[in-house]
Amino acid sequence: MKVVVGGGGPVGVYTAIAMARRGHEVTVVDRDPGPVGAVWQRVGVMQFEHAHGWRPQMLEALRAEMPDVLDALLTAGARLEQLPGVPGIEALACRRPVLERVLRRCAADQLGLSWWTGHVDRVEVAGGRATGIVVDGDLLPADLVVVATGRNSHVGEELRGPVEGGPCGFSYVTRVYRARPACLAYSGFPSFQTGPGYVSVVIGGDAETHSVVIAYPSHDPAFGALRTEGGFATASHLIPNLRNWTDPDVFEPVTDVLVGGHLTNTYRLQGPALGLPPATGLVFVGDAVLTTNPAAGRNLALLIPQVRHLLASLDDPEQDLDDASLALDSWAEQHLRPWYLDHVRWDRTLLERFDGRDIDLAERIPSDVICAAAEVDESLRPYVGMYLGMGAGPDVLDAAEPRVRELLGEGWRPRTPGPTRSALADALHLPTR
């Protein structure tokens, strides 16, 4: 089968390599020509240098389909990290530029896979069947078109129903650091802490690097000062779980302060409605189906398994291309949409708490509150461990909710260590609201 994959990010390249190894003739189309030397400014990918978490699902997918790619990543400096609370489960610590370089290099060496640099204009459809994609005005024919063009792409949207969701209400700033010689690098799964008005995260990377992230309400202009080098350094020094990992005597920054905005929680079916494919021989994967607030680092842990489900459907001789599209929607309804809804609820209720509102006990208890409750009641840890490791869907927390309601009724509330928004504003010499 002749396959065209639109989009050369991690989801697209993983799909292309796996397809080629099944004997298909695969072409990847991406407008970025790839790295030239040490510097790579990825075209059209705002978050390229930003923090990325590669959860166990990514590691499992590499081991299952392309262990040589995993070996190449480890040779390039990627590290395996133990997932806390889930014995024997590992995640991958690696910066995205390193991962994408390795994926592209392996794709270049893969028999049956070619690369086309250009802009995907549209999907070509005739008689209800996708016949290829148009790249810079030229038709690239295919039996199967896989759209993996990213969150800002509109390719093929005229063949689908409306997107569900929208802005998540958060923005973030991040910076990458490297341990100085003879200093210990960050290790362990991400340090994730909810402070009084913001979220602070440290994420391990490859080769002695790590990323520091501060996520905050997009509507609060005071946090804009964090975009400056001085503002970011001041805030990082004041926030407890960031202080040690931004110490200039121990770590040197290797990027500027990077800004992440226009973040979304979105979900979209393959076609115009559940049970209707967009066109025969056309499937959507990756951000074209799901986006979630990146602060939790879940997107690829959900989207790479989506690709694996697509591969399994195509491997089944009893399923045709329409069946594969319908199977993707059925799988996504069960495995993706619950996480989308969980993120929407988490972000909405967290923003409400940042604005001074109490937890609404008439609603389902937000997932982050249940996770925080495990700090005071160890009986909740098995449920929380499965949720954080994504070994089960968000409904794994349902069993923990009654106990958390008891704690909330007794007056317990999640602790929020760190300076308040007003204290940060004072330190940054900004007006308080």
Image (tube, rainbow, N blue to C red):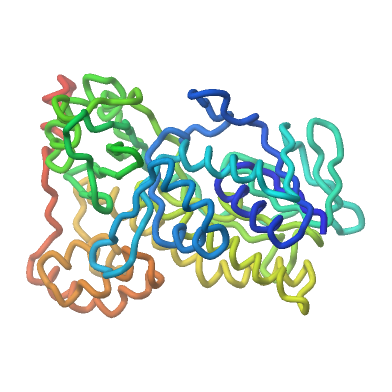
| Front in this rendered view, residue 409 or 75 | 75
**Percent x, y of residue 162:** 64, 54
From the top left corner, tell me how far across and down residue 54 is, in percent. 41, 52
Which residue is most to the right? Answer: 127
Nearer to the camera, 240 or 49: 49
Q: Quadrant location of residue 275?
A: bottom right
Taking 124 as reference, is 348 left or right? left
Position of 136 relative to 273 (above/below) = above
User: In the displayed structure, would residue 309 be above or below residue 225?
Assistant: below
Say whether residue 340 is visible: no
- 399 to 394, vertically: above or below: below
Quadrant that contains the N terminus: bottom right
Please report the residue visible at 9 percent of the width from the left and 64 percent of the height from the top: 412
Residue 142 in the image, given as x and y percentages of width and height: 83, 51
Q: Which residue is drawn at 80% across and 44% down?
A: 133
Q: Residue at x 61, y 72 (%)?
A: 330
Q: Quarter-wise, where is residue 246 in the image?
A: top left
The quadrant in which residue 227 appears is top left
Residue 409, can we see it?
Answer: yes
Picture coordinates of residue 243, whole percent (x, y): 14, 35
Q: How many labels does the image show?
A: 0
* Image position of 280 with respect to 201: above or below: below
| Residue that appears at 80% across and 60% down | 281
Dividing the image into 4 quarters, which one contains the C terminus? top left
Q: Is residue 256 left or right of residue 42?
A: left
